[in-house]
Image (tube, helix red, strand yellow):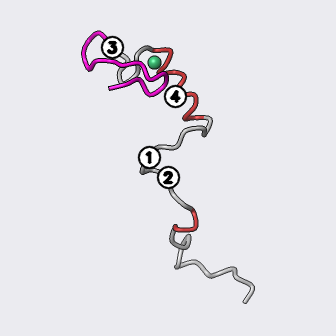
């Protein structure tokens, strides 16, 4: 196991209460990066073009 922020090896025990981060500092750095959009969650990213149409029950606004 490595700290996602700095890559430092950590152990999954009480010596690393901030796991998977090596320290609270790294945890906050990672959280901040995630909130600012720099980090995508693997498997959670959604391509908006793949989403279904918003609501089939509502009248379409397409100018056709
Ligand atoms: Zn770290």
Residue drawn at 60 percent across, 40 percent down? 37
Question: Could you tell me which secondary element the residue under label 2 belongs to?
Answer: loop
Earlier-in-chain disc, 3 versus 4: 3
Query: On the rendered image, what quadrant is the C terminus found in?
Result: bottom right
Q: Circle 2 sits on which residue?
A: 45
Instruction: Give above or below for 5 relative to 42.
Output: above
Other residues around mark 2 within 10 Å, as few (<14) / some (14–19) / many (≥20): few
Task: Determine the CA span between mark 3 and mark 4.
Answer: 17 Å
| Circle 4 Cα neighbour tier, 10 Å, few/some/many (<14 / 14–19 / ≥20) | some
Q: In this view, does 45 lie to the left or right of 19?
A: right
The residue that disc 3 covers is: 16
| Gap in angstroms between the C-alphas marked 3 and 1 | 24 Å
Residue 17 percent across, percent down from the top left: 33, 14
Between label 1 and label 4, give the one nearer the viewer.
1
Is residue 48 magenta-colored? no
Give the residue drawn at x 57%, y 35%: 35
Picture coordinates of residue 38, whole percent (x, y): 60, 38
Q: How far apart are marks 2 and 1 (CA)?
A: 7 Å
- Label 3 CB less than 8 angstroms from ligand 1: no
Say which mark, if any, is on residue 31: 4
Query: Dividing the image into four equal quarters, which quarter contains ligand 1?
Result: top left
N-term mark: 3 or 1: 3
Answer with left or right where residue 46 lies relative to residue 15: right
Span of residues in magenta: 1-16
How many labels sit on residues? 4
Q: Which residue lies furthest to the top in this view?
A: 15
| Dominant SS in magenta | loop
Pointers 2 and 4 in contact (C-beta within 8 Å): no
């Amino acid at each position: 196991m490595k700290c996602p922020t700095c890559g430092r090896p950590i152990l999954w025990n009480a010596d690393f209460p901030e796991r998977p981060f090596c320290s609270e500092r790294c945890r906050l750095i990672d959280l901040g990066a995630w909130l600012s959009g720099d980090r995508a969650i693997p498997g959670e990213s959604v391509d908006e073009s793949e989403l279904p149409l918003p609501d089939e029950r509502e009248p379409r606004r397409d100018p056709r």
